[in-house]
Each structure stands twice: as C-alpha cells, then as structure tokens.
Amino acid sequence: MIIATGARYRKPPIENLARFEGVGVYYNATFMEDAQLGDDDEAIVVGGANSAGQAAVFLARTGRRVHVLVRSNSLSESMSRYLLRRIEETSTIQVRTRTEIVALEGDGRLESVTWRDGAGAVSSHDIRHVFLMTGAEANTGWLNSRLTLDEKNFIKTGADLTQKDLAAARWPLERLPYLLETSRPGVFAVGDVRCGNVKRVASAVGEGSIAISYVHRVLAE
C-alpha cells in the first residue's frame, strides 16, 4: 500500500480567497511565483514561522518591499534567530504584528488587499501578490493512529522512525523500515502527507517512483 493523501494548507477566513488562488494568492514562494513580480511590486507574506521568514527574505532580494503580517505580538517565538536577523537587516522588509488580512479585491486577478492592524484600523493597499505561509495539516485523520505520526500528524517513514517508535508499533521484522516505509511493513507514504517532505510536486512524484521500487522489493521478500 502507498499512502499519498497529501495535506491541506491552512487558510485565513477570507470570503473570496479561492477566487484569487494562483492569480495573486500563493502558498509557496518559488522562482515560478517570483517571476510574476516586477522589481517595483510590493508583496505580502502571511505567517510567523521559518517558512514565512524564508519567503520574505527570498522575495526582498531584488529590493522590492515585502510586508510580513503576523497575528501575534512578535516573530521571536516562532522564527529562528538567523532569519530574524536577516529580516531586521533588510530595510525593504516591514514586519506588521497583530495584523491580518480582512478582504481581497480584484477583477480577474488580485489588485488590492485590505488589512486590520492591532489598533483596529482598517486600510486598503494596492498590492497584487500575497503569499500565505501559514502551514499545512496532513490528511491522516482517517488512519486512527494505526501508523506512527510525528507531533504535527504527518506520517513518519524510514530513518525518521526511532527504535522507540518501532517498539511501540511492534515492528515484526528483523530489518529496519525502508526509505519511505511506515511503521507497518509494506505500507509506504509519499508526498505531502509524509514527515520531512519538502511540499513540492516534483518531490512527491519522485517519492512515488522510489516507493514503487521498494514495493517490488517487499513483494519479493
């Protein structure tokens, strides 16, 4: 069995969010999305964890202004010191704490964003690019704890499974789990549902191909 049930991105409760997905609202900051921004364009990064910090630094590298919106009072609780320092040293990155998006507007694609700050003031801005780096939730609820998961409920595989994990799962074989094998022999996990996956389509496809080779090996045992 190969489990490839993926993950769901956490999304803010914005009424027409789905309308702008892929045309102004993105869930990754890669070279593909970056290519759509001009040097003078502004961008918003939503989130306070390392992925948000990395996205902000990446997007600001050409000198464009990047607004980092976080609901908490600071970034220090959820972001590494290295990224905090990079953000502080980049004059074009502006961190806006206790701030969240309340509306998106545009005709065919995103044209403006309205946010509410910590004082309750609501303001609209002509910004056409929003990167939601708010994390994802694994589609593993249906497993009902039949496989070993990490603290965020992603499936642990291969070397991520500790001896303690295997003992708790009563791993029955002398060999250790293969690269993408779960805590049950012959059951594999690939793509976004797997602990440690980099959340990219190419990576998921590659893992699927690798898992097939291990399936043949298990069947031959």
Image (cartoon, rainbow, N blue to C red):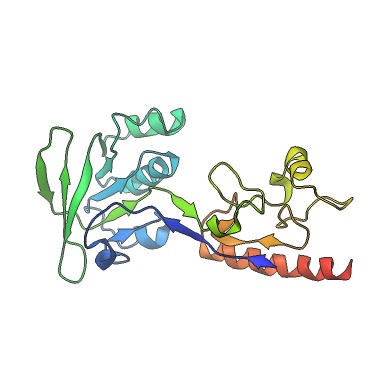
Q: Residue at x 14, y 54 (%)?
A: 126
Observer-nearest residue: 144 or 119? Answer: 144
Residue at the front extreme of this rendering: 144
The picture quadrant where one finds residue 146 is: bottom right
Question: Dividing the image into 4 quarters, which one contains the C terminus?
Answer: bottom right
Q: Residue at x 28, y 45 (%)?
A: 63
Q: Residue at x 74, y 42 (%)?
A: 168
| Residue 192 image offset from top left, x and y in percent | 54, 58
Q: Residue at x 31, y 29 (%)?
A: 74
Left or right of 81 in this view: 220: right
| Residue 1 image offset from top left, x and y in percent | 70, 68
Compared with residue 221, is residue 164 higher up or lower down, i.e. above or below? above
Compared with residue 204, is residue 172 higher up or lower down, i.e. above or below? above
Left or right of 5 in this view: 24: left
Observer-nearest residue: 165 or 113? Answer: 165
Q: How many marks?
A: 0
| Residue 104 image offset from top left, x and y in percent | 18, 58
The picture quadrant where one finds residue 5 is: bottom right
Observer-nearest residue: 183 or 110? Answer: 183
| Residue 59 image offset from top left, x and y in percent | 34, 49
Compared with residue 165, is residue 14 higher up or lower down, i.e. above or below? below
